[in-house]
Image: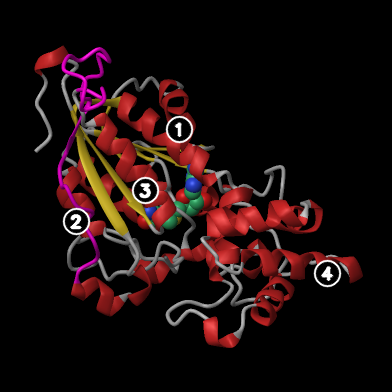
């Protein structure tokens, strides 16, 4: 598993008039297959639950005009401020909302929107956030150990690292970081904070580097990657938001509307895959049961059985996109037992 922020692909040829990475310092991942899958058209309404640097939003705005709208949500006030500037001429078609995408239905309802033609979630953080040392997301640049997408959020990574018990830290790094050296890393953090609190990204990075024997350092990622990922997930309640956000997205889609989700590590992708898979089933009874008693009916049709990955062209321009996975599904009619089955 590897951690990447939503990184860059040169989308300019695939999406004329779309994002301008030079201007934002960020290029969206898997933009071309996402747009091909969601097929935004004039007059349609889309929710982008993860505005970020606005790469997807720019591509949607271009296609839903005239008459369409894009509701873009982000937890990060800096992303919204940048979008207000970047999309200053798009106020007629763009609604910007600060908050968690799990609350997308309330955000939409506040603007009179009850159903939409498409929803996208591009998970994790943007390169703008990653590259800003003051946000504390990256072990590559020194900064305060913060990691909050919403700077007003209740707990920073610093608080967790200095307040949690050794056992809880070990469990966090093992489960959310899938890190085999979780216990020694937690022990090293506790030893280090006994002398002075761990308050910077460089301090944490050095603790992890010292703790994992060099011969066990992963080949393709920095040894601190998994520990930083675990903390970021916990600080931002990322997996809980994803679980609720997927259900909200399914509910708000109109029949025929489409959902596209880009994930960047296996914990996210497993939640996306399982949620879509369950929503695409007509019955969830155990296989040995001869009659359905669950009354579960499919609400989604999976548009691709396997996740869509960046192609060679995208990987060549942006190697950091390598762990991105796009899954796409279409909302079915609320038609009871005779709904289409997934392929
Ligand atoms: C990977 S970036 C999105 C990049 C965007 N697709 C683009 O093209 O520029 C993810 C963004 O989603 C935001 N985000 C992540 N989880 C969120 C959540 N649960 N609710 C709202 N925003 C979230 C992050 O703050 C970040 O700005």
The residue that mark 4 highlights is: 191
The residue that mark 3 highlights is: 270
Q: Give residue 129's quadrant in the image.
A: bottom right
Q: Nearer the viewer, mark 1 or mark 4?
A: 4
Q: Give residue 175's quadrant in the image.
A: bottom right
Q: Does the magenta-highlighted stretch encompass residue 162?
A: no
Q: Give residue 266's quadrant in the image.
A: bottom left
Q: How many marks?
A: 4
Image location (x, y in percent) of residue 321: 34, 68
User: Callout 4: few (<14), some (14-19), or many (20+) C-alpha neighbours within 10 Å?
Assistant: few
The answer to whether residue 302 is visible is yes
Q: Nearer the viewer, mark 1 or mark 2?
A: 1
**Marks 2/4: CA–CA distance:** 48 Å
Image location (x, y in percent) of residue 289: 21, 20
The secondary element bearing badge 3 is classed as helix
Q: Is residue 171 left or right of residue 53?
A: right
**Marks 2/3: CA–CA distance:** 20 Å
Q: Which residues are magenta?
A: 283-311
The answer to whether residue 231 is visible is no
Residue 33: numbered disc: 2
**Marks 1/4: CA–CA distance:** 37 Å
Image location (x, y in percent) of residue 49: 41, 41
The residue that mark 1 highlights is: 244
């Amino acid at each position: 598993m590897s951690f990447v922020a939503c990184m860059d692909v040169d989308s300019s040829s695939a999406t004329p008039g779309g994002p301008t990475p030079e201007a934002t310092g960020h290029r969206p991942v898997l933009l071309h297959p996402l747009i091909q899958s969601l097929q935004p058209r004039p007059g349609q309404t889309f929710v982008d639950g993860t505005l970020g640097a606005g790469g997807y939003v720019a591509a949607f705005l271009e296609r839903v005009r005239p008459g369409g709208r894009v509701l873009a949500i982000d937890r990060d006030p800096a992303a919204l401020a940048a979008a207000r500037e970047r999309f200053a001429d798009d106020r007629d078609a763009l609604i910007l909302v600060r908050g968690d995408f799990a609350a997308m239905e309330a955000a939409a309802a506040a603007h009179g929107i009850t159903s939409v033609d498409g929803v996208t979630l591009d998970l994790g953080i943007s390169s703008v956030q990653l590259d800003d040392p003051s946000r504390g997301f990256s072990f590559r640049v020194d900064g305060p150990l913060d990691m909050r997408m919403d700077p007003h959020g209740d707990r920073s990574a610093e608080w967790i690292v200095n307040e949690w018990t050794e056992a809880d830290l070990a469990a966090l790094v093992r489960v959310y970081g899938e890190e085999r050296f979780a216990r020694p890393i937690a022990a090293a953090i506790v030893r280090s904070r006994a002398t002075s609190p761990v308050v910077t990204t460089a301090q944490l990075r050095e603790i992890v580097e010292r703790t994992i024997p060099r011969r066990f350092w992963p080949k393709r990622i920095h040894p601190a990657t998994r520990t930083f990922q675990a903390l970021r997930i916990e600080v931002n309640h990322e997996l809980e938001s994803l679980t609720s956000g997927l259900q909200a997205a399914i509910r708000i889609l109109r029949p025929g509307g489409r959902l596209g989700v880009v994930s960047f590590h296996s914990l996210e992708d497993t939640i996306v895959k399982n949620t879509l898979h369950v929503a695409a089933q007509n019955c969830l009874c155990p296989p040995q049961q001869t009659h359905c008693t669950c009354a579960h009916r499919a609400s989604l049709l999976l548009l691709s059985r396997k996740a869509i990955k960046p192609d060679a062209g995208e990987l060549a321009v942006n190697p950091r996109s390598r762990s991105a996975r796009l899954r796409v599904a279409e909302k079915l009619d609320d038609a009871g037992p005779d709904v289409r089955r997934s392929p």
